Image (cartoon, grey):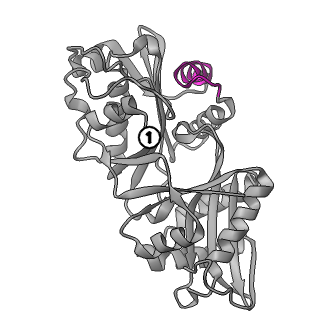
Amino acid sequence: MATRTQPQSAGISIRRTKAQDMEAVVALDATFVGHPRQFYFQRRLKAALDQTERHVQFSAEQDGKFVGFIKARKLLGEFGQAATALRLEAMAVVPDKQRLGIGSALLARLESEAKRMGVPAIRTISSWRDHAVMQFFDCAGFEFSHNLVLDCSMRQNRVTAHDGDKILAPAHVTGFSATEVDYSAAAANDFEALAGDEFEVRALKAGDFDDIIRIDQKVIGRRREAYIRELVDEAMNDSAVRVSLMASVDGMAAGFVMARTDFGDYGRAEPVAVVDTIGVDPGYANRGVGHALLSQLFVNLEALRVERVETEVACENFALLGFFYDVGFEQSQRLSFDKRVG
């Protein structure tokens, strides 16, 4: 990739990605990832063509030949974020055309689009071991995000071994959608009994929308109707990607988790699921509802041969960090970055 300190090569043009670019995009991505991700890019391109104000994709040409691409999507509330942003998900430049300013040109076009959309920031994730990308982000003006990236191997999760809510951190909730447990009060719950006898955990239904809005608003203090509606619609219409669950106690909605298995973001080659948001009605806190939700989620993901589960949590959200650490998550080798658009 190029940096802003490098001159832009002559003959570069940036345009919106077209359906005809798909073969070239997949082939270029495969040179870095190691295998083609046809399904992933087909889905993302279709979304970009159908939802132009949510998905943004550009391709670079030099002397009429495809030499790179960039793609992003507009965040509506993932990971508890209040401010909107463009999420940079993938970017690549043909190897023998790197360090010619093509990557900088693609990013500059994305920034221009963000300004047009009224979006104040670009966010992304990358492994700290990818030194070339780290250098590119540094030169491009990205900074560390306030969010921590957490992940958990399917083989290392401890969610089914829950032995009661533990006092891991103070119940200070900001950012991510959760008041999962009140860590100031320990409980001696037997998780497996609760999950099997007291809770009903099932796949999300269209009729759950109002309950999710109600719980989410109680948890984070604001109404995220557009974001929740999109998640519910995706869960209903695209079960191959969205893995979302609802928990109830005595017939009353008590909590939900929204996750997706749209493999491929940020150069990930292995099957990874992402938890976008989890919420438990404060009236059912400290009863293991969140553990029951994640327990069933891991069961469902294992059947899909997912290898890891990932999420992001605001670094000051000690309660939610404690919850995820309790069930086996740990700090990822991936880092979160932000760039202000101004």
Visible residue check, residue 23? no
Above or below, 309 against 323 in this view is: below
Q: What residue do we see at 40% from left, 65% from top?
A: 269
Q: Which residue is mark 1?
A: 313
Residue 219's x, y, as percent? 52, 22
Q: Residue at x 71, y 50 (%)?
A: 119
Quarter the N terminus occupies: bottom right
Residue 111 appears in which quarter of the rendering?
Answer: bottom right
Looking at the image, is 283 positioned above or below residue 79? Answer: above
Q: Residue furthest right?
A: 116
Q: Is residue 216 left or right of residue 303?
A: right
Residue plotted at (67% across, 73% down):
106
Name the foreground residue: 52 vs 166. Answer: 166
> Which of the 4 image quarters holds residue 19?
bottom right
User: Would you say residue 193 sits in the magenta stretch?
Assistant: no
Q: Secondary structure at mark 1?
A: strand
Q: How many marks?
A: 1
Query: x, y (%) of residue 265?
Result: 50, 59
| Residue 148 screen position, x and y as percent | 41, 47
- Work out whether 248 lies above or below 9: above
Q: Main secondary structure of the magenta part?
A: helix
Q: Does residue 100 appear left or right of residue 136 in this picture?
A: right
Kind of residue at badge 1: Val
Q: Position of residue 287 (x, y in %)?
A: 32, 15
Q: Which residues are magenta?
A: 208-223
Residue 339 in view: yes
How packed is label 1: few (under 14 Cα within 10 Å), some, or many (20 or more)? many
Q: Quadrant of the C terminus?
A: bottom right
Q: Is residue 328 above or below residue 50?
A: above
